Amino acid sequence: MNFYKTLFIFLLFSNMTFAEELEEVFIQDKSVESEAVNEDNMSFDSINSEQLKDSQAESMDDIFQQTSSVTTTGGPRSNSEAPQIRGLDAKKIFIYVDGVKQSFRTDHSTMIPLNLDLIKAVEIYKSPFSNISKTSLGGGVQFVTKDPSDFFSDNKKRGLNINLGTQDANFSKKSALTFFNQAKKWDYFVYSGYTDADDVSLSDGSTLPNSAYRDQNITSKLVYNKNKNTKYKLTVDYFKRDDTVPINPTLNPPTDIDSLNGTNINTRQLFKLEYVFGKRNFTLYHNKQEQLKERNGDGEKESRIVKTYGTSFNYHKKLKYKIDVYTGIESVKDELDGKRSNADLESYPTGTSQLHSAYTHVEKEVTNELKLMLGSRLDDYTLDGINSDVAQNHSSYVSNKFGVSLNTSKNTTLSLQQSQGFNAPRVQDIYIDGLHSSGDGFIFRDNYFIPNEKLKPETSLVSEISFSYQDNLFSIEDFLSFKIQFHESRIKNYILTERIDRSVIDDEDGTTQFVNIPKAITAGVDLMLEYIYLDNEIKITYSKIRGKNLTEDLNIQDMPADQYDLFLTKLFGSDLKVGIHFLWAQEQNRTNPETTQRTEKTEEYLIYNAFISKEFKNGLSLATRVENISGKEYRRHGSFLKEKARDLKININYKYYF
Amino acid sequence: MKFLLLLFVSIQFAYADIPEGKYLLNKIVCTTGKVIKLDSKEKFVGYKVYLTVKDLAMTMTAKAKSKGWASFILNCDQRNKGKFSYVGDDQFEGYLSLDKVKCNVKMWTGIVKKRKFGVHEQGLANYKVNGKKLIITHFESENRYSCADEGGIPQYYYTKVN
């Protein structure tokens, strides 16, 4: 369907429907789309700024340890860590930072350059239902970064923030300086940060070679507050990482094999404009991410670049009769370019990907007890391989969702929701070509990637049933919350790689290709029990998920292990906080040892972390955290290397106002 | 007498049988000079091959295993069995045929079976013993690996380990 015709119809429909509107109130901190989510809905989770501060995160994995809703695989090198939600990996979920799509993926790396100091919240969408505006097979993650006003305090709006941190697992040293100011209607900050980390110590007592890195970050945000409801924001961001991770950073090849090791420079440059008017949000951005590799020995150079041009518009309207309407459009264009010594890099084909989307999500409070939600989105994508004989790939898809939330009593809620997900294939999935792995010259032939012009998008039908109970248990000083959600996702055309190896006696080489599996299914349960009494909090979560490739009767091998988490937190006054976290992951043996898949069974493990943080009145805050206190040797399922050893983290932050 | 003693010793040296025991295969060298290494640091699969000689029978066991840093997990076991009899100067006639192949992945079992590593049909072979070293050349065999590309014949270089 022509995208512009669709857009016209969408806008026409929008204007016809939105006959009356109530007053709009500007909400500063939340993204428009996250406002649609009822935070009690178990399809949504979030990590707030307090939790982020407690985590002293140096990597995405450190952030996600604060919740059982999302895990990472491929670590512990941070270059290869990728988020995973309900068993769906980074290629099947969306990843955004402040509305900017993160598109960089290679065959073995999902380097998402995050300025961890500036993240103030993480929104985790576990299914297409909770996510109203982004396209994916299941859910996704949105990182929300600080605005200048996040550094202000009461009427103090000018100053410096100094942050110093260290971690002993990799002897990392971090230093960051932020200058922030408000001048009349203008808010701004300028941030500069540097991190130097050595090779990381692993929980088996070894040191992981080529895991050291040096990061440089420079970020600036300028906000013009025209009035209470209108803002213009400009963000400029630069990130650079130098490291020597291997060609495949999820593995640990010997350091003296030159062909598998090299030096790397990863850079990211972002330029973003945002216009916020009431509950309207318009964004325009250009994000360029580049990875340069120079191989040891012969010095052969490879470069991989993705330039992302994006624009989006989101709008929230409150209508009469308790109707909320969320609507928006998004267009993203990725331009990919891969080069090896100035010739095309076939494993990172040059091409473009365009995705245009439009959505509407409506919520209606029928009665005080009953709420209905329904939504629809249109996705239209086009993939082109430049310099490829493979034809253009194009498709459109309409996804729908429906949900009911019923307060069965004053304290209990039952929710039923069903939603469709959609995930377009990537340029690499279709156009990839060239040598995958060399044969051994003895028994196995070389193995080559082959394109697949018939590759279809993945689609899902996700059903979720939730029950929650919330009440004061003994008095108004305490609060008990219990939530449980069962979920199932029926997936069509699940994309995975198919590898066929051949003997030196055969006439042709082996092949690797991205293919569609007609039918797959994932199903699981999430459970949360939380009790707060005065300044004490105890939270227990449990998550379990199973995945099956129904067509081939195989397990989806990288499903996360069943996991229990226990969080205990106590506040002493308003300035001292102590916490401990137990994480118990069960054995995960649902793999396919009879196939070529690399994933092996993972043993059960129990680790615990603890932290203390203290705020002083003069603007100084001190935090210390120990992870894996017992030094337990363990490996996360879906990763091939052991995780970090015991890690002592110390962070000092000083904010000075002038 | 001295002459007979000398003749006896000469015969023993010239027609030494292959000492019974277990041998580790170090490399295969083509008669053209090309070397086929069974393991090296760059290869993502390493091969360990043993040859047991006992009672005019040979058993070859081969294990192919992927290295820890390979992007897939391969584990194959192969066994060849055969009989031989000595004929002439440092020569025997015999065969080694495929007895068993099992890999963790069915596709690779098929590949390894097809490859017929170490399999030689009934025919003559030369051998040379020098201390713990043993070299065997199945010069009548059709199974010549990549040595055939240059018109060469594979020679198995072993070291006695047991």
Image (cartoon, rainbow, N blue to C red):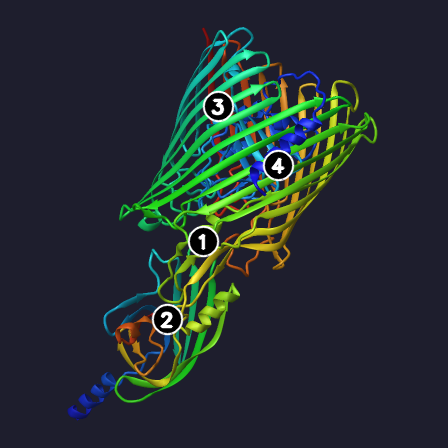
Residue at 59%, 51% in the rendered image: A494
Give the residue at mark 3: A273
Q: Determine the secondary structure under disc 1.
A: loop
Please tell me if label 2 and label 3 are on a single chain.
no
**Disc 2 vs disc 4: Cβ atoms closer than 8 Å?**
no
Chain of the residue on which disc 3 is drawn: A
Q: Which quarter of the rendering shows the C terminus of chain A? A: top left
Say which amino acid is labelled 1.
Val
Q: Determine the secondary structure under disc 3.
A: strand
Picture mark count: 4
Q: Residues within 10 Å of mark 1 (few under 14, many from 20)?
A: some
Tell me where residue A50 appears, x and y as whole percent.
57, 22
Q: How crowded is mark 4: few (under 14 residues within 10 Å), some or many (20 or more)?
A: many
Say which amino acid is labelled 3.
Leu
Numbered circle sitting on residue A390: 1
Tell me where residue A550 appears, x and y as whole percent.
64, 56
Quadrant in which residue B131 is drawn: bottom left
State the separation of the CA atoms marked 2 and 3. Answer: 75 Å
Please tell me if label 4 and label 1 are on a single chain.
yes
Give the residue at mark 4: A68
State the separation of the CA atoms marked 2 and 4. Answer: 55 Å
